[in-house]
Image (spheres, grey):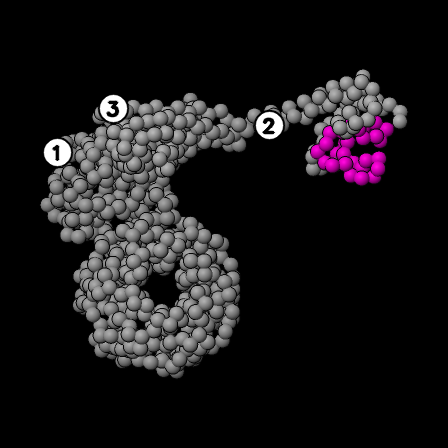
Amino acid sequence: MADAAVTPLDQCTSAHAPGPGYGASQAGTARPPGRPSLERRGLHVTLASLFARRVPPRARASALIALAVAAIACVAPAVSAAKSRTAKVRLTAIPSLTAKQHSLTMAVRARPGATCKLSVRAAHRRAAFPPLATDARGRGRIRWQVPSNGPSGVWRFAASCSQGRARGARRTRRHLRIGRGLGSGALIAHSSTEVLQGTFLANAGGGLGRSCGHVVGGGTVCFTNNPLFGSAGRSTWYALGRRPDLGGVVHADARTWLADARGKTAEGTTPAAGAIAVWLPGAGGADRLHGHVAYVSAVADGGKTVVVDEANWVPGLVSLGRRVRATEIAGYIYRPGADAGSPGAGGSAGTPAALPAADTDGDGVADVADACPLQAGSPANAGCPTGSRFLFGDFNADGRDDVAVVTAKHDGHPSGVNYNVLTSTGSGLTPAGVWGTADDVDVPSSRFVSGDFDNDGKEDILAVTARHDRHPSGATYSVLTSTGSKFNAARQWSFSEDVDIAASRFLSADTTNDARDDLVVVSPRSAGSPSGADYTVLASTGSAFNNTGLWGSAADVDIAASRFLSGDLNNDARDDLVVVTPRRATHPSGATYNAVTSTGSKFNSPAAWGGADSVDVAGSRFAVADFNNDGSEDLLAVTDRGAGSPSGADYNVLTSTGSAFGSPGVWSFADGIDVVGSRFVTPDLTGEGRSDVVAVTARRAGAPSGASYTALTSSGSAFTNAGVWGFS
């Protein structure tokens, strides 16, 4: 074979795409991609062949030099590109462990305006801070206190920073001894996080005079002209934002607030809604150096429990609705003009009074005029979304039922829809943000049902939307399945052309005992009164609804005047129906409770399981749930206590024996609730197997009303008022 002279590579070739030097070998077989080659007169010479064949030393040396030059030319741009995407990050952990304080500081240096995520690990625990934006010099610095029972040993610190496509990370570790070295507590003390350089990302790039903070579970809280804007994310910043009347009275150090207020505004030791609660340093888990302050949103349990909204209890974040013992709090700073000695001064329990100049939810409507100051709305709706619906279900599969609030995105048709979720902690409802949204859904003309339609342990939402703008409207059945932290985009599972949404009712129920909730459509048999009722079941396959036809009907039921509920009344693992029908047209109408039990393929004929002459169907609210954890679901009738407004409410429970409802028993009552203007859902808030009640009540007169969520937890024989767990 003649000696082959070699030439330098003309250009780099891809390991995966054909190019110069990539083709068929002399034998006609494809050369493996990614092997460098030299080409002359159609002869491919691989690096291996330079040594395998008899290539003269001079030619071999020339080829190797050519390959080296080509490799440098090929690799250099990639190295340069990689370098352009790498951001240099420096990280320092600075402990200050003395007898009086155990503080740690993380100092990061990156590009100016970079977003840095900082976290710390020790003793199998991990804590993270909200994203931090570096300052104009690229510096960020966070300091916090370690609890006295914090763990000793190796502490690992991490920083990950990015700006555009440039990213970088750095880790470091320190061996620390906290106190006596035997602790196993938290890594960060409540209310102790301070930003010394940079700013939390929620507050970066804000307009002049505007400061913001992220809310636990999603969302942002903003204030305008807060004097403590430089301390955004700390407890004093949030408390002053909720009480701007204290500007010039109090300062950045929470431990001095009671002394600052003394002689300038009313303060005392009686809890009151609308007041500022002040913790002394170290009390109730507060920061041992500076203490803590929070806004009192409600007072419960006769003044023994205080519900607070606050910042920095969770590092750098705003949290809403934490319930604390009143004995932990040193004192309160009351609203101007409030009766300082009266519990609930400044607003009723669960109804924080409006605050001038503050705009807590950042929707452009000042809290003084905002009926929903913690839920962004529009000026046209007094700061609230329009036409809200309330559903419940275990949307995150943690064993506790949550609440979903379906709200319109705007006025007009279609209104659009947001699916907001409040998750249960077992002692409160925490806003988890918007889990789903759609622009083509019209909330007023649609219906919404919750249920586990795909049997994955997480409850989903069914949206029933109109197919036409005429009568009958037709119905499209779209399911938004839950991932545990959001809802997937809606998918059409079925539709009906002859169903009219306004005249029909829609229920979720596992009628077939396959662990998947099905859809029961209750539609009128005629246009007269009574309308009669047809019960059609669309069985779930896990990804679609299969119309199984008519399961039952009733000629003497009027849909508009009746109420329809679902639940397993006889503990046979198949969900049944309860149809509440009026006994007469006059007030009170009386009520008959009809059970329509399922065989798994049809409904049995209705059977009267109970009734009451004193109940007015139109003026009452009904629900089916297992309040005593015996496997058979019971009936809740929420009836008015009087003819005034508010009407007050009696919570009557009729327990199921499996073949009838027992006599009604009043498990609780409330004088300040208006039944007709409220909504009642029955989730298992605590995960104990007994269904509880959430009373969704108006926060203010007028429309829109806003909403407070009051929890009544079940003991199996009575409800205990657990106070306000949240509001929007």
Q: Which residue is mark 3?
A: 98
CB within 8 Å, label 3 to label 1:
no
| Residue sitting at x 25%, y 67% | 638
| Residue sitting at x 71%, y 28% | 12
| Count of numbered labels shown in the rendering | 3
In primary-sequence order, the first of circles 3 and 2 is 2
Determine if the magenta segment contains residue 25: yes
Question: Which image quarter: residue 127?
Answer: top left
The kind of secondary structure element at disc 1 is: loop
Furthest residue toward right: 2
Q: Pointer 3: residues within 10 angstroms few (<14), some, or many (20+)?
A: few
For the residues labelled 3 and 2, the Cα–Cα distance comes to 47 Å
- Residue stretch rendered in magenta on the structure: 19-45
Q: Which mark is residue 81?
A: 2
- Foreground label between 3 and 1: 3
Residue 428 visible, this angle: yes
The kind of secondary structure element at disc 2 is: helix
Secondary structure mostly seen in magenta is: loop
| Residue sitting at x 71%, y 21% | 68
Question: Which image quarter: residue 635?
Answer: bottom left
In primary-sequence order, the first of circles 3 and 1 is 3
Q: Which residue is mark 1?
A: 262
In primary-sequence order, the first of circles 2 and 1 is 2
For the residues labelled 2 and 1, the Cα–Cα distance comes to 62 Å
Could you tell me residue 79's position as x and y percent? 61, 25
Q: Is residue 341 left or right of residue 4?
A: left
Could you tell me residue 260's position as x and y percent? 16, 31
Q: Is residue 94 left or right of residue 87?
A: left
Under mark 1, the amino acid is Arg
Furthest residue toward top: 58
22 lies above or below 622: above
Q: Nearer the viewer, residue 84 or 288?
A: 288
